[in-house]
Image (spheres, rainbow, N blue to C red):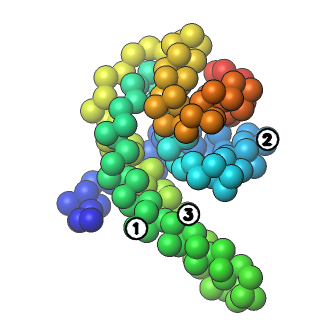
Amino acid sequence: MDHGAHNATLCLDNPFWRYSLKQYAVTGCSEFLLAAQDDHSLDINVLLFLGWLADTGKTFSPALLEEPMAFTTQVIEPLRLSRRTMKTQGNDALYQHIKASELLAEQHMQALLYGKSRALETLEPDATSIRKSLSTSLNEYLPSTLKHNQDWKALLMRYLSPRLG
């Protein structure tokens, strides 16, 4: 995958990144999203992206995920595996270095997603449109077992959108 043409124009500190940091810091959110990642193989960045899109009045399209998901497979997942391996090896300095690299790679992926979203039409969102947009986006992304689990999905939606809390 060639990201060379995109690297020069990526904005690592963007509204989506700042939204993600804010939402991830909400009590219980990080634990919930990490469980979604570990237990259901969901991508935390994608979940946050869906929340941010709905919250900002932008419409999700699965095509937005193609390049960023390839980056996740090729870069983030190997870093995550290395970090988890090093955590048990007793080399804290290397573990911390890999952890920092993984976070930077996650920020890069979010910059890719943000770049894709910039061309989307933006509507003025309200709680009803956010709820509908986020539910529709999640139904396109989540596996059947989760999209039909209304309690789980409702909790996820509250973590992903500050306006639905």
Drawn side of residue 21 relative to residue 11, left or right: right
Alpha carbon of mark 3 to alpha carbon of mark 1: how far? 15 Å
- 10 Å neighbourhood of mark 1: few (<14), some, or many (≥20)? few
- 10 Å neighbourhood of mark 3: few (<14), some, or many (≥20)? some
Which one is earlier in the sequence, the residue at label 2 or at label 3? 2
Drawn side of residue 139 relative to residue 165, left or right: left
> What label does residue 27 carry, if any?
2
* Residue at mark 1: 74
Residue sitting at x 65%, y 80%: 85
- 10 Å neighbourhood of mark 2: few (<14), some, or many (≥20)? few
At mark 2, the secondary structure is loop
Residue 28 vs residue 11, the one in the foreground = 28
- Disc number lying in front (2 or 1): 1
* Image location of residue 48, percent across then percent down: 55, 40
Question: Does residue 25 show up?
Answer: no
* Image location of residue 137, percent across then percent down: 48, 28
Residue 90 vs residue 35, the one in the foreground = 35
Which one is earlier in the sequence, the residue at label 3 or at label 1? 1
Q: Classify residue 142 by image quadrant.
A: top right
Indicate whether 83 appears above or below 46. below
Image quadrant holding the N terminus, namely bottom left
* Residue at mark 3: 103
